[in-house]
Amino acid sequence: MRLLRAGIAGWAFWEGFHTGEWILYVLGGIFALQALFNAGCCGSTACYAPPARNERQDDTASVVYEEVK
């Protein structure tokens, strides 16, 4: 994914140079920073993945039940 962002940044800088559009430099800068710091668009836990459950733990074996009459 990092190489894809770096490629998009390179393309944006190249096109900005050829067309003279300053907005492509901004877009290239954003993608270059994402590639440099390996950061995506998942800010504020937008891509939250729950922690993996450990299937080896058997917590039900330690439960003690008491019958109430």
Image (tube, grey):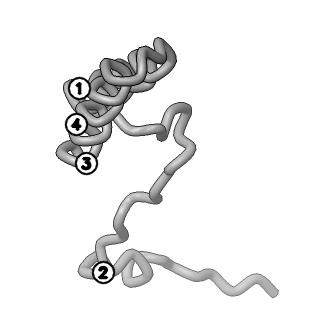
**Sequence-earlier tag: 1 or 4:** 4
- Judged from the image, the secondary structure of the residue bearing numbered disc 3 is helix
Q: Quadrant of residue 52?
A: bottom left
- Kindly identify which numbered label has been placed on residue 54: none
Q: Residues within 10 Å of mark 1 (few under 14, many from 20)?
A: few
Q: Nearer the viewer, mark 4 or mark 2?
A: 4
Looking at the rendered structure, the kind of residue marked 3 is Leu
- Kindly identify which numbered label has been placed on residue 37: 1
Q: CA distance from mark 1 to mark 4?
A: 11 Å
Q: Residues within 10 Å of mark 3 (few under 14, many from 20)?
A: few
Q: Nearer the viewer, mark 2 or mark 1?
A: 1
Give coordinates of residue 13: x percent, y percent: 30, 24
Residue ID for mark 3 = 4
Looking at the rendered structure, the kind of residue marked 2 is Glu
* 54 with respect to 43 (left or right): left
Q: CA distance from mark 4 to mark 2?
A: 39 Å
Q: Quadrant of residue 35?
A: top left
Q: Quadrant of residue 2?
A: top left
Q: In the depicted view, which residue is nearer to us: 35 or 18?
A: 18
Query: What residue lies at 44% left-to-right and 81% top-to-bottom?
Result: 60
Residue ID for mark 4 = 6
Residue ID for mark 2 = 55
Query: What residue lies at 29% left-to-right and 22% top-to-bottom?
Result: 33
* Vertical position of residue 10 compared to residue 68: above or below: above
Look at the numbered discs 1 and 4 and tell me whether their residues touch, using CB distance below 8 Å.
no
In the rendered image, which quarter contains the C terminus?
bottom right
